[in-house]
C-alpha cells in the first residue's frame, strides 16, 4: 500500500502553515513552523513569485496533506465530487471529512489524522458493530464508531475517558463508552481547515 513515509514536519514547512500532523507536538515549542518557518530544501528561504497555477497547486497539495491522501486517491475524490449535485468544492471537502480516519480524529479518539489512520489500520475500531481496518472507508449519517472492547483497556484509550475534547457539531461522542455517532453530514461551515476549495476546482478544470 502506497503511503508517505517522510518527515511530517517537512510537509507543514512546505505549505507554510501547521497541518497538525503530529498531534500535541504541533501545539508545543518544538513545532517546525515555529522554529523554521520557511520551505525545506536548499532554496527554501528564497523569495519566489507564485503564479496562479502555483497557488492552485499549493491548495491541492495542502488539502491532500491535511487528510493524508495520495494523488490518485485525491483525483478520484474530485471526480466523484464533480459528478454529484451541488458545489463541487464543498462536495469534495465533505467526502474527505467523512473518511473513517478523519471521523475518528474529529471524535477525539486520536490526536492527529495520521495517528487515527494508524489506529484504524491496526483494527482498534468497530463500525456499526463490525471490525474495520480501512481508513478510507466512507461513513454515513447514523453510523456508530466504537473502540473495540479489547482495545479500550489500553493506556491510549483510558486517557480519553478523563480528557475534555471539543468535537464538531455533526458528531456526538460518549467518552465513557468510547463510542461516537455521526449525527449528520458536515456542511462547509463545519469544516474548519484553511482550504480555498475553489482553487482546487480551478486547477482540475484546466
Image (cartoon, rainbow, N blue to C red):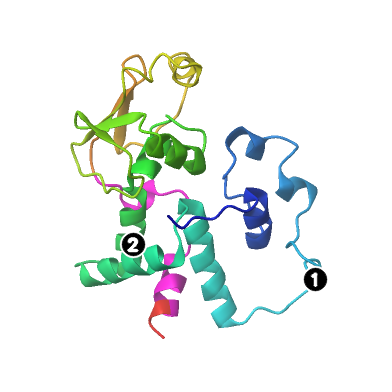
Mark 1 neighbour class, 10 Å CA radius: few under 14, some 14 to 19, many 20 or more: few
Quarter where residue 116 is shown:
top left
Q: Between marks 1 and 2, how big is the CA–CA gap?
A: 33 Å
Mark 2 neighbour class, 10 Å CA radius: few under 14, some 14 to 19, many 20 or more: many
Count of numbered circles in the view: 2
Which residue is farthest front? 1
Q: Is residue 198 left or right of residue 16?
A: left
Q: Nearer the viewer, mark 1 or mark 2?
A: 1
Q: Which residue is mark 2?
A: 92
Quarter where residue 119 is shown:
top left
Quadrant holding the N terminus: bottom left
Q: Is residue 197 magenta?
A: yes
Return the mark for residue 84. none
Q: Is residue 18 left or right of residue 33?
A: left
Residue at image coords 31%, 23%: 148
Q: Is residue 84 above or below residue 124?
A: below
Q: Is residue 116 above or below residue 75?
A: above
Secondary-structure class at tag 1? loop
Residue at image coords 73%, 47%: 32
Q: Position of residue 57 (x, y in %)?
A: 53, 73
Q: Is residue 120 magenta?
A: no
Q: Is residue 79 above or below residue 148?
A: below
Q: Which residue is mark 1?
A: 43
Q: Nearer the viewer, residue 178 or 17?
A: 178
The part of the chain drawn in magenta is 185-203
Point out the tag, 1 or 2, that comes first from the N-terminus.
Answer: 1
Amino acid at each position: 500500500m502506497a503511503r508517505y513515509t517522510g518527515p511530517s514536519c517537512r510537509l507543514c514547512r512546505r505549505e507554510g502553515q501547521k497541518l497538525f500532523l503530529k498531534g500535541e507536538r504541533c501545539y508545543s515549542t518544538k513545532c517546525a513552523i515555529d522554529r523554521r518557518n520557511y520551505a525545506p530544501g536548499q532554496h527554501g528561504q528564497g523569495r519566489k513569485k507564485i503564479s496562479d497555477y502555483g497557488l492552485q497547486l499549493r491548495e491541492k497539495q495542502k488539502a491532500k496533506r491535511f487528510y493524508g491522501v495520495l494523488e490518485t486517491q485525491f483525483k478520484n475524490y474530485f471526480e466523484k465530487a464533480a459528478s454529484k449535485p451541488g458545489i463541487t468544492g464543498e462536495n469534495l471537502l465533505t467526502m474527505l471529512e467523512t473518511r473513517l480516519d478523519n471521523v475518528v480524529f474529529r471524535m477525539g479518539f486520536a490526536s492527529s489524522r495520521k495517528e487515527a489512520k494508524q489506529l484504524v489500520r491496526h483494527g482498534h475500531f468497530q463500525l456499526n458493530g463490525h471490525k474495520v481496518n480501512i481508513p478510507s472507508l466512507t461513513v454515513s449519517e447514523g453510523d456508530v464508531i466504537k473502540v473495540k472492547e479489547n482495545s479500550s483497556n489500553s493506556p491510549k484509550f483510558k486517557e480519553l475517558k478523563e480528557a475534555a475534547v471539543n468535537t464538531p457539531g455533526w458528531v456526538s461522542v460518549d467518552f465513557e463508552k468510547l463510542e461516537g455517532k455521526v449525527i449528520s453530514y458536515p456542511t462547509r461551515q463545519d469544516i474548519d481547515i484553511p482550504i480555498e476549495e475553489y482553487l482546487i476546482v480551478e486547477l482540475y478544470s484546466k
